[in-house]
Image (cartoon, rainbow, N blue to C red):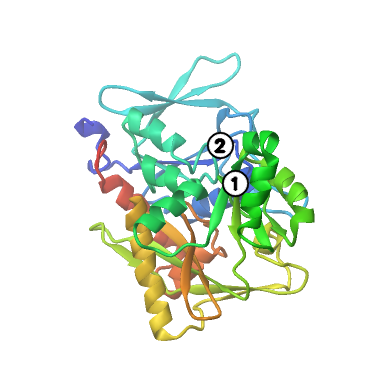
């Protein structure tokens, strides 16, 4: 990057492109996250460009209006307006610029990008795909790199990596669409080996979309059909009966050291048998978040230590949320790691950090500064 494009140059604010939406089933949640991030970025310190990815994959220059990106009830989920002006990244020798194209108008250059803040959830965003594109373009970005993103997105491989690092995980089996179609007897036997009830999850999904609790074998077909709607790979996972659901945030310090937040607990009651999409994102009386969690000091300390171990096992960068089950006998097992967790001010990750002394605006600012400071290429 030449001196004129250096974000540290006097009189020049670093340009941050907030990229959101995407092609996954978590498109709407990404939009909600983006609205919160856009509202929190200090416009006096950064030049902010909102870029939406429509559900068909088209990149557009969005309005950046946080109010338009809020959930307006069960039927009012936000989405990217794919009819807006198209945007492309144009890598050059010394910088990467944004080119905007509108109908009947010549292309225009919007300016150089110093860092991308990809608040994308799910496949084609949180799974290493956009991270790989940005690496090839030589653009700095917030969050985990290609490998950490890909491994953490795919729950079946995530478990392999975490177990290899010595971290306890729940028993599970993976069933692909092809296996379910051509050898269903074997797939049912593998499911039965876990015992019932169990959970069926899209292996590369998030926000609890497509997840079902399977009480007995009679419900397995419907659960597999639901999960396969979102992913041709399904994770069948043993049920952690009576477990407490606890989460912990990881955030790198500016020197790269991973720090942890206070743990927090999710408590579900009423008609919800687990932390499903409605319980996560649609306000109601049956979901309670205890921040911090009421845990013995030794258990909270163990969770924080295991969070760093999980973060380092996958090669995390920037941020992550690590989810745990605290079993009735006191054992702690890792449920999963999320490299781009829900990021609205009311989401668990920012709330844990707020309770740990880092408010939302400071959290966003630290992630941008971390991205601006890190090297381009192999790290």
Residue 357 seen in the current view = no
Closer to the camera, 179 or 260? 179
Closer to the camera, 292 or 175? 175
Q: Horizontal and vertical percent for residue 80?
A: 63, 38
Dots 1, 2 in contact, CB < 8 A? yes
Q: Residues within 10 Å of mark 1 (few under 14, many from 20)?
A: many
Secondary structure type for disc 1? helix
Q: Quadrant of residue 97?
A: top left
Q: Residues within 10 Å of mark 2 (few under 14, many from 20)?
A: many
Which mark identifies residue 52?
A: 2
Relative to residue 296, is residue 311 depicted above or below? above
Which mark identifies residue 31?
A: 1
Q: Quadrant of residue 59?
A: top right
Which residue corresponds to the image point at 25% horizontal and 26% vertical from the top-left?
94
Left/right of residue 263 with respect to residue 59 in the rendered view: left
Relative to residue 218, is residue 103 depicted above or below? above
In which quadrant of the rendered image does the N terminus lie? Answer: top left
Closer to the camera, 173 or 240? 173
Of marks 1 and 2, which one's residue comes earlier in the chain? 1
Residue 280 seen in the current view = yes
In which quadrant of the rendered image does the C terminus lie? Answer: top left
Q: Horizontal and vertical percent for residue 178?
A: 63, 33
Closer to the camera, 262 or 308? 308
Relative to residue 194, is residue 174 depicted above or below? above
Distance CA(mark 1)–CA(mark 2) = 8 Å
Left/right of residue 351 with respect to residue 285 in the rendered view: left
Q: Horizontal and vertical percent for residue 267?
A: 63, 74
């Amino acid at each position: 990057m030449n001196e004129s494009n250096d974000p540290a140059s006097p009189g020049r604010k670093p340009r941050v492109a907030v990229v959101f939406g995407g092609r996954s089933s978590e498109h709407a949640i990404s939009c909600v996250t983006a609205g919160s991030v856009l509202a929190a970025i200090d416009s006096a310190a950064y030049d902010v460009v909102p870029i939406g990815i429509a559900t068909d994959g088209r990149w557009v220059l969005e309005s950046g209006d946080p109010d338009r990106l809020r959930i307006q009830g069960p039927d009012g989920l936000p989405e990217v307006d794919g009819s807006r002006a198209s945007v492309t990244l144009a890598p050059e020798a010394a910088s990467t610029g944004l080119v905007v194209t509108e109908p009947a108008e010549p292309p225009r250059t919007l300016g150089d990008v110093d860092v991308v803040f990809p608040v994308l959830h799910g496949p084609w965003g949180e799974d290493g795909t956009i991270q790989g594109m940005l690496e090839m373009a030589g653009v700095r970005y917030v969050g985990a790199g290609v490998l950490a993103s890909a491994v953490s997105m795919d729950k079946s491989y995530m478990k392999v990596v975490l177990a290899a690092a010595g971290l306890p995980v729940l028993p599970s089996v993976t069933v692909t669409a092809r296996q379910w179609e051509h050898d269903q007897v074997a797939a049912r036997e593998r499911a039965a080996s876990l015992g019932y009830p169990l959970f069926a999850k899209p292996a590369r999904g998030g926000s609890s979309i497509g997840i079902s609790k399977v009480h007995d074998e009679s419900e397995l077909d419907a659960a597999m059909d639901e999960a396969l709607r979102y992913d041709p790979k399904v994770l069948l996972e043993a049920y952690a009966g009576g477990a407490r659901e606890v989460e912990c945030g990881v955030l790198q310090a500016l020197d790269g050291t991973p720090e942890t937040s206070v743990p927090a607990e999710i408590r579900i009651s009423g008609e919800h048998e687990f932390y499903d999409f409605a319980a996560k994102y649609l306000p109601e009386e049956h979901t309670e978040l205890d921040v911090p969690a009421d845990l013995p000091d030794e258990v909270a300390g163990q969770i924080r230590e295991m969070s760093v171990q999980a973060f380092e096992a996958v090669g995390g960068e920037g941020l992550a949320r690590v989810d745990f089950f605290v079993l009735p006998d006191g054992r702690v097992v890792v449920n999963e790691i999320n490299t781009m967790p829900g990021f609205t001010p009311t989401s668990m990750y920012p709330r844990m950090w707020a309770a740990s002394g880092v408010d939302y605006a400071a959290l966003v600012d630290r992630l941008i500064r971390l991205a601006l400071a890190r090297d381009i290429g192999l790290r």
